[in-house]
Image (spheres, grey):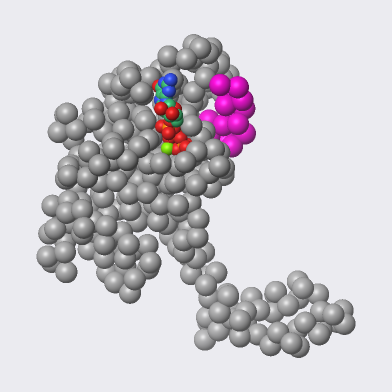
Amino acid sequence: MKDWLTSLRQKDKRTIAQTITKLENRDPDALAILQQLLPFTGGAHVIGITGPPGAGKSTLIASLLAFLRKQDLTIGVIAIDPSSPYSGGAILGDRIRMNRYAMDDGIYLRSMANRGKVGGISRFTKDSVRVLDAAGFDVILIETVGVGQSELSIMHMTDSICVVLHPGAGDMIQVTKAGVMEIADIYVVNKADLIGASRLIAEIEDMLEISGGKADWAPKVIATNASAHQGIEGLWTLLQKHKQYLKHTGIGEKQRIKQLYHEVEEELWLILEQKCKEVWQQQDFEKRLTMLEKKTVTPQEIAKEVADRLFGMESE
Ligand SMILES: Nc1nc2c(ncn2[C@@H]2O[C@H](COP(=O)(O)OP(=O)(O)OP(=O)(O)O)[C@@H](O)[C@H]2O)c(=O)[nH]1
Ligand SMILES: [Mg+2]
């Protein structure tokens, strides 16, 4: 266990990958692993990069990676691949760019398909963040497509959130509908080289004026051209500013505690769901179905009976 932790702390890619996989599969060691990681967590600046498909999130991350590496910062990237019909879902745009980082121990990339995992995307992402944080990465970037409610879960695992938009019909409406607008600390208007960028900036600024933004942090708007590496330094400056704000006001610490409470709740629901299913599977289906068919019992009554049984068993 000691050797394992030492190589993890040295950012050994194999160890990182194995650890994440073990957590992902809820290996019997998972709880012990999480316990061992705990003292080493809390150092990373965790940043969510969200926004509609094709906004340029991956390109922006690739550009940020290049910029941050020059400053000798280490970065972990978690990409939630939506496997959407909108795009090929290629992480960081293309394989060549990825290969460039394969040999660099200051960068770790991990992607995950947005379906079919026990405990869902939220648990996977949190576990991965924890591993990368404990490994000592300075910055952790999480890419998600912000078009559905489930993506809002990044607010439960990040310090700062960038919503990336691009000039194009309907973007604002789409993102506003998904509730993504409210969670932004920084709005990135990417593809600033395209027509409509300044109008989009004005639209966002109007919207912020009306809504008043978050409590004391007035969300910032920045234009970037990720393909041409423009605006990246400005974006990083804003992210640093936000980090300072979180630190000086103590809001960052409060936010993290809130996130831990939320995680306890999420874990609890998972455990309860599992237990409920176990009890349900022990039920005498034949008899219940006949009773349902004969209309001598309602589905609600059966559900309640199973629930009572579950909690009765728990209190024994
Ligand atoms: N003109 C222009 N094109 C850009 C810019 N940034 C990204 N693109 C292009 O936009 C397309 C989508 O970029 P991605 O980085 O894959 O976008 P994404 O938001 O990660 O997309 P999904 O992960 O599929 O949601 C690619 O063809 C990029 O080359 C930019 O600043 N200007
Ligand atoms: Mg992408």
Question: In the current view of this chain or complex, which residue is farthest to the front?
Answer: 96
Residue sitting at x 66%, y 79%: 306
User: Magenta span has 169?
Assistant: yes
Indicate whether 168 appears above or below 53: above
Residue sitting at x 61%, y 81%: 281
Q: Is residue 90 left or right of residue 270?
A: left
Could you tell me which quadrant the N terminus lies in? Answer: bottom left
Q: Position of residue 147 (x, y in %)?
A: 55, 38
Which image quarter has ligand 2?
top left
Q: Can see residue 265?
A: no
Q: Position of residue 127 (x, y in %)?
A: 35, 56
| Label tally | 0
| Magenta span of residues | 168-181
Q: Is residue 212 left or right of residue 185?
A: right
Quadrant of residue 240 in the image?
top left
Viewer-proximal residue, 3 or 306? Answer: 3
Viewer-proximal residue, 304 or 278? Answer: 278
Indicate whether 1 appears above or below 279: above
Q: Can see residue 15?
A: yes
User: Magenta span has 189?
Assistant: no
Q: Is residue 41 left or right of residue 291?
A: left
Q: Is residue 61 left or right of residue 183?
A: left
Viewer-proximal residue, 154 or 8? Answer: 8
Residue sitting at x 48%, y 69%: 271
Q: Position of residue 131 (x, y in %)?
A: 27, 54
Indicate whether 252 appears above or below 133: above
Residue sitting at x 37%, y 30%: 59
